[in-house]
Image (spheres, rainbow, N blue to C red):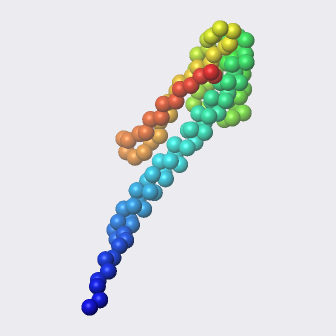
Amino acid sequence: MASKQQQRGLTFIGLLVVGGLLAIAGLIAAQVFPTYIEYMAVQKAAKKAAAGTTVADVRSIFDKAAQIDDIRSISGKDLEVGKQGNNVVVSFSYQREIHLAGPAYLVMKYAGSSQ
């Protein structure tokens, strides 16, 4: 007598569920990725702005860099400028909301400094 082999694999319904979950995760990742890219641009602009000597100079340098890198979430007036020893420290924090569906939002909170 031949022995029966067990079948292994995914059912069609299981494939649809896994595909749907991967599609939803992909849509969310596609909306989150640009906010992370913008955060990296803000971080770079803050480090550039730390080369300024006065608060107005720091904000001006940041605004010029923000215009080049198309940063819209934060501007020079939102920066916190301080000194640590002889170095100028530029700090920032902001949040981005991503609408998911209905009343559901994904809130991304970003913070950093030039150090």
Residue 81 location, x and y as percent?
62, 14
Q: Does residue 67 appear in the picture of this structure?
A: yes
- Whether residue 14 sits left or right of residue 49 in the image: it is left
- Whether residue 74 sits left or right of residue 7 in the image: it is right
Residue depicted at x 42% and y 62%: 19
Residue 100 location, x and y as percent?
42, 45
Residue 19 lies, with reference to residue 86, above or below; the image says below
Residue depicted at x 44% and y 57%: 22
Q: Quadrant of residue 87?
A: top right
Residue depicted at x 62% and y 21%: 115
Q: Quadrant of residue 68?
A: top right
In this view, the residue in front, 43 or 73, is: 43
Residue 98 lies, with reference to residue 3, above or below; the image says above
Residue depicted at x 72% and y 22%: 61
Residue 16 location, x and y as percent?
38, 65
Q: Does residue 12 appear in the picture of this structure?
A: no
